[in-house]
Amino acid sequence: MLLMKDIIQEGDPVLRKRAQDVSLPLSETDLNTLRLMMEYIQNSQNETLVETYDLRPSVGLSAPQINLSQKLFCIHTVDETGKNLFSRAFVNPKILSYSEEKTYLPGGEGCLSVDESKNGLVPRSLRIKARAIEVDLETGATESVYLKLQGYLGIVFQHEYDHLRGVLFVDKVVEHLPGVVPVQFTENNNQ
């Protein structure tokens, strides 16, 4: 089980390196790494486990954050409607295109690898197209996927993808985003 002590913090050089491609077929070690990453995210969304293990809540986690410079990340969250669960593990993702139209999280972004007191508005593309190898964490089966993401899920994917390029959200924080419309969450889903 991963804990906060396993997540490296801003200032660690691994967070600033470009991650390496992961060899396929996926090794048992890499599969277990993805399973541990997903387990952390899911545990961090359980209030009892957050209190018991002093976890910070999360919706995504990338391998560089646990001191592995590999192109692996997991996302476990619902979209802005609060109705559609997006729980997926990715290997060697690549964003193919970014829309010119921007958006942002109205409350700003945060990160497990950055001090909680730091947050801010980060301009992100409203829509992205990406490809990746998706991993079924139960069976270990892999499949090449093409993704079209927008809004909140697109922001989360871009945030995790940045980790694989040695970029932290604090590198992109701006004071104001005039004319840019934030992601709109439904009332019962205030991320």
Image: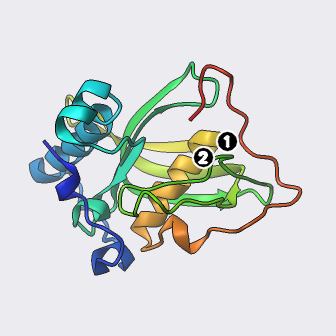
Residue 18 visible within the image:
no
Residue 48, picture quadrant = top left
In this rendered view, identify the residue nearer to me: 99 or 181.
Answer: 181
Q: Cα distance, mark 1 to mark 2?
A: 5 Å
Left or right position of 95 against 41: right
- Label 1 sits on residue: 151
Task: Tell me, yes or no, whether the two marked residues, 1 and 2, touch with CB atoms within 8 Å.
Answer: yes
In this rendered view, identify the residue nearer to me: 12 or 73.
Answer: 12
The label on residue 154 is 2
Residue 91 visible within the image:
yes
Amino acid at dot 1: Gly
Left or right position of 116 against 152: left
Question: Circle 1 sits in a helix, a strand or a loop, which is it?
Answer: helix
Q: How is the image coloured?
A: rainbow
In this rendered view, identify the residue nearer to me: 93 or 180.
Answer: 180
Where residue 3 appears, x then y in whole percent? 18, 48
Where residue 96 appears, x then y in whole percent? 60, 60
